Image (cartoon, grey):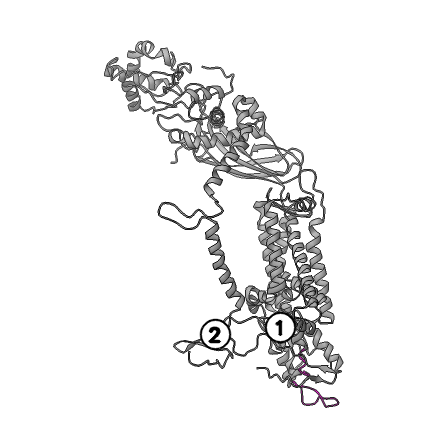
Amino acid sequence: MIQTNDNQVQAAPGIDRSKAVAVSPSTPQSLYAKRKQIYAKLAHGNFRKLKWAALFILLGIYYFIPWIRWDRGPDAPSQAVLVDFENARFYFFFIEIWPQEVYYITGLLILAALGLFLVTALFGRVWCGYACPQTIWTDLFIAIERFFEGDRNARIKLDRAKWDFNKIWRKTAKHIVWILVAAATGGAWILYFHDAPTIFRDFLIGHAPITSYVFMGLLTFTTYTLAGYMREQVCTYMCPWPRIQAAMIDDKALNVTYRYDRGEPRGAHKKNATWEGRGDCIDCRQCVAVCPTGIDIRDGLQLECIGCALCIDACNEIMDKIDRPRGLIAYDTDANIERRQKGAKEKFELIRARTVIYAILFAAVGSFMLFGLLNRSTLDMNVQRDRIPNFVELSDGSIRNGYQIKVLNKTPQVRTLDLTLDKFQNPVLRIVGQDNPQTISVPANQTIDYKVYVALEDVSGLQVREGFNFVLEDTQTNEKVLTPSLFITGKTEK
Amino acid sequence: MSEKRIDEQSGTEVTGHEWDGIEELNTPMPRWWLWIFYASIVFAIIYAILMPALPGIDSYSKGVLGKSDRVEVVEELYKLTDQRAVYANKMLSADIETIEGDEDLLRYALAAGESAFGDNCATCHGTNGQGLPGYPNLNDDIWLWGGSYEDIRQTLNYGIRALHEDTRVSLMQAYGRDELLTREEISDLTEYVVSLSGREADASAIARVSTLYQEQCASCHGMDGKGDRLQGAPDLSDNEWLYGGDRATIVETLTNGRAGVMPHWKERLSPDMVNSLAYYVHSLGGGEKSDAPTQ
């Protein structure tokens, strides 16, 4: 339990003690706890800079990507990244994915999961701290809040103040900008599902499909509430990742860590007093003041910590002022603290069994997918043999089998294809509705069904069931696809 | 609860529930969570007012918005019919070359025909037209009345021995039941019919009835048993049998005659649907060219 002594206002000469108190103290609380508002203070330092950079880059990617053009010829959309539900296609620059290739998406999710595991085992929750959309948008919304209402103390004062003109205009302006940002977020989302310039114009003049308005409204609402109001509650109560991370992190994983071996015993420091026999923590609580989830990192690694490292910035600033070395709060491991306490040298063990396994799995899945993508066939054929009737005996004594053939042309050109069999003497092929018994012309980017009949005049030398391959060959590129099937000869089994 | 006790390990209050020394911590739940629960209740009430929700004895609450899935389905069906009208109209006058020359029309005819076949024809002819004893197999190239698109359409529209005045009729007489032939003659004729399809048969029996066959059977089935499509007379020489080719079945056919009925669909299905159906049956594998010589 933290002892608070608010009479003491100076943590060290020239450094005010913040009145910040962690929101999740270990004191008794009632069921249905009221949420405590967190007024995160602006931090200054390298990690804050890194977070600004991540914010600009990631938001830039999100808002800008749908506008990138990519020429795929006249029959395909010319948007670089597009989820085309209407035609059941997913386009990503030079990659085009068909519904039956959804395993690429699965692979991508597996890669993302393994990547998260690896990064978490190495550096703790860097995903949560720097890249998670919830963190990014919350950060942006807090920045907007700070722009209109000022930093921590000013915001606390404003919230306590009466509703005068100053408070009303600041609050109103903040909410208007929030809603605009939220609308832009929801608006950018739908650009991923339609041709961006077209849907943008249609959207404004009210001609876009109803789903566009619904999703835009939905995402505007969720962005506004989750980033404006819910903030750390999403991470603490809704998100499963904080729970999963517990299994990823061990005592050798780097985490935002308060080095209690150096900081304790903490306490206010008087001018010219000695640093002998006491810790470096002057209990100024700047680390609590800047924390976006309102915790006290000095209580140790905890569920609510998103690993944003802003407390490192805040503490370093103080250490500079009191002329103590930086890094009282830093990326460190539990194992190192124990080592230092025993007088041993600190050691960073990035290569451990789990990180190696995650890295190998990541590389394996990644190269498997890359191999699949590079060798992706642009021609495919599925064959389904008719089972009712199994075979048909014709008037001239020949035996006929029927097949349903699905041909996939994944190129943007019409293709002329030859259909043959790799077995049997003089098989008679017929494709329903086609003049030519063997050559089909498949339109660009389409899957076409054909009914194909194969008749054999003489089945005397054949088994009850004869396996063979349908061979589909592009007359120009000679690309070939073989699909196995069966011919039932109509003989009785012995 | 009389007193609030704090768990020493976690520093959290306990609820007072205890099972064999295991106590429940009173970990607080966020208040907004509770509000979401209340909001769901409000939503449910509003929903029940706006939408059909509450069951009654013989009806249900219709909801203020008047939404009805059933009405929407009917509207969707009308919309679909309108969309299909383009192809349906084309099907009215299209001949087989037109159908096969138009990829979209071809797929429409096959899809519409297959669906209509499942609804109307599969009961007798089997799911894929594979046939049953007495009901012709539509997959092979053996036709009683002809297998061109026009022939199939004719059969579909007017049926065989159906109630329509333009229906086609063929008559296989009940030679035994009507005492036109004796048992011995029927037995010998059976041997004759068996021999027509190239199987071993009693030569003396054949010799006894060869004149009888010419008199009684050849007018329809032909001198060599090849049948006659103009009269709907089956080919007896191809060893493909509508009712069965074993001796017992042939005796039964000769004794009692055969008169299977194919209903006429002219009034029951729309003309474009009959045409789609005809094309589908034609596509099953045995379809003949329109100018194919009739035997």
In x, y percent, where is residue A337?
Answer: 63, 79
> Which residue has dot 2 on it?
B26
Mark 2 crowd level (few <14, some 14–19, many ≥20, 10 Å Cα): some
Query: Where is residue B31 shown, x and y percent of the image?
Result: 53, 68
Q: Is residue A153 above or below residue A395?
A: below
Gap in angstroms between the C-alphas marked 1 and 2: 21 Å
Q: What's the mark number on residue B62?
A: none
Name the residue carrying label 1.
A294
Residue A431: tell me if it is visible: no
Q: Chain of mark 1?
A: A
Q: Amino acid at mark 2?
A: Asn
Q: Give the residues drawn in magenta, as a range.
A: A266-285
Compared across the picture, whether B124 is left or right of A281 comes to left
Residue A50: percent from left, percent from top: 72, 66
Near-viewer residue (A195 or A430): A195
The residue tagged with tag 1: helix, strand or loop? loop
Q: State the predominant SS element of the stretch in magenta.
A: loop
Magenta span contains residue A297: no
Residue B124 found in image quarter:
top left
Quarter containing the N terminus of chain B: bottom left
Residue A146 falls in image quadrant: bottom right
The residue under the point 28% across, 17% down is B174
